């Protein structure tokens, strides 16, 4: 072996040693960053879900304390001015929407006074409450009482608070001893739903258990309705004992209702008489995905390092054998380079001349395009509505300042991302859900972003032939209109409630006078009182309609469907109208099939209102000598009822408003001055709440036909 061969061997050994040392160093770096990073990740997960559970706990505790403080203030007000007890209670109900009812109990447990939010309470409705746990607790200990969660007959989750009273008032007849209040716990369910739906706090959900381990709030309300008990979970036992807990302890691990292993953090919520538990949980497959990926990255990184070390070593050996070939190739390339430089110089001269001739045209056209672009950007930037421009892949290409303001999102954060990928931003998610639910063209569809922010969403697809190029999404803020509408509904509800009590008193007084309980009446007095009684009844009907409309708009119009024979129900309502049709000389007939109709699930009281509304309209807007026919039919798994008349009909240009609030057609207002314009609006909401359909056919001057259907239970 000559001297050059010895030098080559030495260089090869040195380079192999360097490759080996670098490989060991990279392996050590992987090991050193992986272990502390895993610990830091576990700590972050615990903090994240503890924060989520703490947020829910603080909101629930704050709401309960607020209601308790309001009732303690009420107790103080009644103690200082007992003669105004009823006024104090009425004011408390108005100011605290979550309170369902308030009652004063005497020392014997008898209710002396009770006010309810949704109904009028008379003396006959007052009950004996000496067996009530709240009364017994407060009477025995003279301390406040908070009941466990219970379910009302209407399916509402409630809890009861009670406070001791020390006063004597002749007005109530007995010494009031206890004040009790029933409170809707919907605020607990809303807190759980809101925090579970928020994605900025991590995946997963929140649920709440009472002191016995029963679920009282969960995003899946079917589990709450089944009264599921989760006391067998280790963290639930810990939290009900007043200790914080998590499933980092192997003994505390459990599976959720889907059979998935979960990570969970539980915090205790102190309540009078015990403790509740607030638990934040999420599937381990979602929580620890990043940790698993980190481990795989470490293994992959080490494998890649070994692979490249091997490649470098093999490549170095091949380079030693090809060095001479490279030198010869270099000489050939130098020769080719000289020839190529000559040809490139000639071609460059030609291109330079062509470029000089086109340069002026390019500059002029560039200036025009820049001006057009600036005009378009100025319009978009100063547009009063929010604008999003999406490409064919639903990726954001442009967002104007108004959209940034409405969505709390910067253009740099949104550019290049799909609308579904931006769902992690709370204000984007409702819009993303709406675009995915209705992928075709949208027009003024509402999306509730936050409590006081509602946007109308309109999409404008831009196509070339059948090919979708881009989609313009227009966001219009309608929060102010919604606020005004809600204020109007609340005012109507408050005014109707305030009018209901005096109207009821007037009704009872008139009835007593007509029944001669207050003395005899002559003919003129009786006629005058009967007219007054009928006018008062119409006013009560109007108040009831206003309350029904308010309940519908607030989502509190409760239905109690039972299997009902619609034929018998219609027959009973029709019988009550036959005398009135005969008095007005209108021909009336009920046509029904010979075969019995199947029963349908229906709220008898609500469906009766719809049938009465159809018959009232036919009776009121059909002239003497006219004809009204009611029909019952069955087909396609639904029972159909409709009423046809030969009355005034509905003008063509007003048909689209027929089911809206307070609407009455112009042609019938001259015929029948009475009416609130609310009947068909209420009827439509009742039928649609039953899963049925309601519609009409009409021609002005010839009559109308109003239909509704109710589905048959399969």
Image (tube, rainbow, N blue to C red):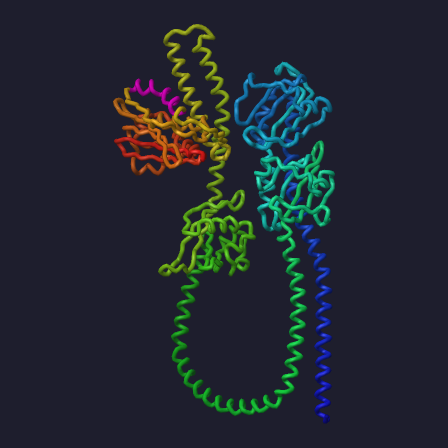
705 versus 388 height, above or below: above
Looking at the rendering, in which quadrant would you find the N terminus? Answer: bottom right
Residue lying furthest bottom in this view?
Answer: 2
Front position in the image: 121 or 468: 468
Image location (x, y in percent) of residue 657: 36, 37
For the record, the magenta segment spans 569-584
Looking at the rendering, in which quadrant would you find the C terminus? Answer: top left
Assign the magenta stretch its main secondary structure: helix
Is 581 magenta? The answer is yes
Image location (x, y in percent) of residue 662: 39, 32
Figure label count: 0
Residue 532 visible in the picture = yes
Left or right: residue 687 versus residue 29 is left
Front position in the image: 496 or 129: 129
318 versus 194 height, above or below: below
Front position in the image: 639 or 687: 639
458 versus 2 height, above or below: above
571 versus 357 height, above or below: above
Left or right: residue 311 versus residue 120 is right
Please give the name of the residue rendered at 70% of the width and 32% of the height, measured from the top-left corner: 272
Please give the name of the residue rendered at 40% of the width and 74% of the height, measured from the top-left corner: 362
Image location (x, y in percent) of residue 110: 63, 17
Is 678 magenta? The answer is no
Residue 79 visible in the picture = no
Quadrant in the picture for residue 107: top right
Image location (x, y in percent) of residue 348: 44, 85
């Amino acid at each position: 072996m000559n001297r050059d061969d010895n030098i080559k061997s030495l260089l090869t050994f040195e380079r192999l040693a360097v490759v080996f040392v670098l490989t060991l160093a990279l392996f050590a770096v992987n090991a050193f960053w992986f272990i502390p990073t895993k610990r830091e990740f576990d700590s972050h997960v615990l903090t994240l879900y503890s924060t989520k559970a703490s947020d829910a706990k603080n909101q629930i505790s704050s709401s309960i304390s607020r209601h308790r403080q309001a009732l303690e203030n009420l107790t103080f007000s009644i103690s200082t001015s007992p003669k105004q007890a009823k006024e104090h209670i009425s004011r408390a109900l108005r100011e605290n929407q979550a309170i369902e009812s308030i009652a004063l109990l005497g020392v014997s447990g008898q209710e002396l006074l009770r006010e309810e939010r949704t109904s009028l309470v008379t003396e006959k409705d007052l009950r004996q409450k000496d067996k009530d746990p709240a009364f017994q607790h407060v009477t025995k200990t003279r301390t406040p009482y908070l009941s466990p969660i219970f379910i009302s007959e209407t399916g509402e989750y409630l809890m009861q608070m009670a406070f001791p009273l020390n006063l004597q008032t002749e007005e109530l007849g007995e010494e009031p001893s206890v004040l009790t209040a029933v409170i809707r716990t919907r605020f607990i369910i809303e807190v759980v739903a809101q925090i579970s739906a928020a994605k900025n706090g991590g995946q997963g959900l929140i649920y709440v258990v009472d002191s016995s381990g029963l679920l009282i709030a969960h995003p899946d309300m079917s589990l709450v309705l089944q009264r599921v008990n989760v006391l067998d979970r280790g963290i639930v036992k810990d939290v009900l004992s007043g200790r914080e807990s998590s499933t980092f302890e192997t003994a505390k691990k459990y599976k959720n209702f889907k059979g998935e292993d979960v990570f969970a953090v539980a915090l205790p919520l102190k309540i009078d008489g015990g403790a509740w538990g607030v638990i934040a949980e999420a599937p381990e497959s979602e929580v620890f995905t990043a940790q698993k990926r980190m481990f795989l990255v470490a293994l992959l990184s080490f494998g890649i390092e070994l692979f490249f070390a091997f490649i470098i070593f093999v490549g170095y050996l091949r380079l030693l054998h090809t060095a001479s070939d490279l030198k010869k190739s270099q000489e050939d390339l130098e020769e080719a380079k000289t020839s190529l430089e000559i040809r490139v110089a000639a071609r460059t001269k030609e291109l330079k001349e062509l470029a000089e001739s086109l340069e002026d045209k390019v500059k002029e056209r560039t200036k025009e395009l820049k001006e057009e672009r600036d005009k378009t950007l100025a319009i978009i930037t100063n547009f009063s509505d929010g604008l999003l421009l999406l490409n064919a892949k639903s990726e954001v290409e442009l967002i104007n300042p108004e959209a940034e303001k409405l969505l709390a999102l910067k253009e740099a954060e949104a550019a290049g991302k799909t609308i579904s990928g931006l769902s992690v931003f709370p204000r984007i998610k409702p819009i993303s859900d709406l675009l995915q639910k209705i992928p075709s063209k949208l027009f003024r569809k509402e999306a509730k972003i936050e409590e006081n922010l509602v946007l109308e969403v309109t999409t404008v697809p831009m196509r070339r032939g059948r090919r979708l190029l881009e989609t313009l999404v227009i966001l219009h803020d309608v929060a102010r209109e919604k606020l005004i509408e809600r204020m109007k509904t609340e005012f109507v509800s408050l005014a109707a409630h305030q009018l209901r009590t005096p109207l009821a008193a007037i009704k009872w007084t008139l009835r007593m006078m007509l029944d001669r309980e207050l003395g005899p009446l002559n003919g003129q007095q009786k006629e005058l009182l009967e007219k007054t009684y009928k006018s008062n009844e119409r006013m009560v009907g109007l108040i009831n309609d206003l309350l029904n409309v308010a309940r519908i708009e607030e989502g509190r119009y409760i239905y109690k469907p039972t299997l009902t024979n619609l034929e018998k129900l219609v027959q009973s309502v029709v019988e009550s109208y036959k005398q009135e049709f005969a008095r007005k000389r209108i021909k009336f007939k009920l046509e029904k099939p010979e075969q019995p109709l199947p029963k349908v699930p229906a709220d008898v009281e609500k469906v009766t209102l719809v049938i009465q509304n159809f018959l009232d309209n036919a009776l009121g807007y059909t002239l003497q000598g006219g004809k009204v026919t009611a029909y019952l039919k069955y087909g396609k798994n639904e029972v159909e009822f409709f009423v046809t008349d030969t009355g005034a009909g509905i003008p063509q240009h007003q048909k689209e408003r027929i089911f809206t609030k307070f609407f009455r057609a112009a042609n019938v207002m001259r015929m029948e001055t009475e009416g609130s314009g609310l009947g068909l609006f209420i009827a439509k909401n009742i039928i649609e709440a039953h899963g049925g359909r309601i519609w009409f056919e009409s021609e002005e001057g010839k009559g109308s036909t109003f239909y509704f259907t109710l589905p048959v239970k399969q």
